[in-house]
Image (spheres, rainbow, N blue to C red):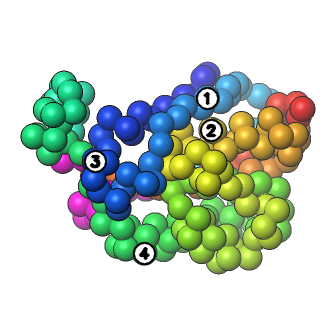
C-alpha cells in the first residue's frame, strides 16, 4: 500500500497575514507499507483523535476545491487559511504530549528506546516542548521545519525521507510519528523502519 501526504498550501495562504504566510509551504512525500509476518517489522500501535470544539483555531473558512477558482475569488470568498497562533500552540503541545506519552506507556516502551521521533513539523517551539516533555535527546528528534516550512500532511513523510537520504535511518530502528492538524485532529504511530538504510 502506498501512503501519500501532499499539500499545496500556497493556494490557501493569505500573503498579507504574517501569522500564517511565513510558516507554511508546499510539499509531498510517500511511504510504501506492506503486510508482514515478522513482528519485528510490523507497526506496533497507532493512536488517532479529534475534537471539533477547537475547529476555529486552525481552519479554512469557505474552503473546498469548488469554492473558488483563482486568487481573487478565494480572497472574496474568504477561502484563506486562518489560525489563532497562541491558542493553537497551547492545544498542540498539550495534545501531542499527552498522545505520545500514552502510546509509549500502553506499549511499555521508554522514550529512550525511540531512535527517531518524527513529529509533524508545525514549528520548532511545539516540537521542542513535546521533545522536552518526553526527555528526548536532540539526536532523537527529527527537525526539518527550518528547511521546508510547515508542509502540513506532507511533513512527516518528508522528514522520514530526509533522515533516510542522509543515511541516518537504518533497518529496524524504532520511529515515533506524531501529527496534529486542523479540525482539530491528531495522531501518533509507533513502528520500526523495515526498509534498508542507505
Q: Are marks 2 and 3 in contact (CB under 8 Å)?
A: no
Marks 4 and 1, how far apart in space?
29 Å
Q: Residue at x 61, y 22 (%)?
A: 1
Q: Which mark is residue 141?
A: none
**CB atoms of marks 4 and 3 within 8 Å:** no
Q: Which residue is mark 4?
A: 90
Q: Nearer the viewer, mark 4 or mark 3?
A: 3
| Residue 167 appears left or right of 17 | right
> Is there any visible trace of residue 153 in the rendered image?
no
Q: Would residue 51 be counted in the magenta stretch?
A: yes
Eye-nearest disc, 2 or 3: 3
Which range is magenta?
Answer: 49-62
Q: Secondary structure under badge 2?
A: helix
Label 3 or label 1, whichever comes before in sequence order: 3
Q: Which residue is mark 1?
A: 30
Q: Earlier in the sequence, mark 2 or mark 3?
A: 3
Amino acid at each position: 500500500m502506498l501512503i501519500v501526504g501532499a499539500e499545496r498550501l500556497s493556494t490557501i495562504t493569505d500573503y498579507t497575514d504574517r501569522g500564517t504566510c511565513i510558516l507554511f509551504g508546499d510539499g509531498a512525500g510517500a511511504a510504501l507499507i506492506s503486510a508482514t509476518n515478522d513482528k519485528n517489522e510490523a507497526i506496533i500501535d497507532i493512536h488517532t483523535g479529534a475534537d471539533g470544539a477547537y475547529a476555529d483555531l486552525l481552519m479554512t473558512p469557505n474552503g473546498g476545491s469548488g469554492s473558488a477558482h483563482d486568487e481573487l475569488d478565494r480572497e472574496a470568498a474568504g477561502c484563506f487559511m486562518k489560525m489563532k497562533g497562541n491558542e493553537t500552540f497551547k492545544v498542540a503541545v498539550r495534545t501531542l504530549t499527552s498522545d505520545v506519552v500514552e502510546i509509549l506507556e500502553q506499549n511499555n516502551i521508554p522514550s529512550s528506546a525511540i531512535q527517531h521521533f518524527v513529529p509533524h513539523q508545525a514549528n520548532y517551539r511545539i516540537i521542542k516542548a513535546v521533545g522536552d516533555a518526553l526527555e528526548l535527546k536532540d539526536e532523537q528528534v527529527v527537525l526539518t521545519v527550518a528547511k521546508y516550512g510547515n508542509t502540513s500532511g506532507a511533513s512527516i513523510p518528508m522528514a522520514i525521507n530526509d533522515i533516510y537520504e542522509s543515511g541516518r535511518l537504518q533497518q529496524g530502528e524504532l520511529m515515533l510519528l506524531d501529527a496534529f492538524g486542523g479540525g482539530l485532529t491528531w495522531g501518533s504511530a509507533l513502528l520500526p523502519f523495515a526498509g534498508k538504510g542507505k
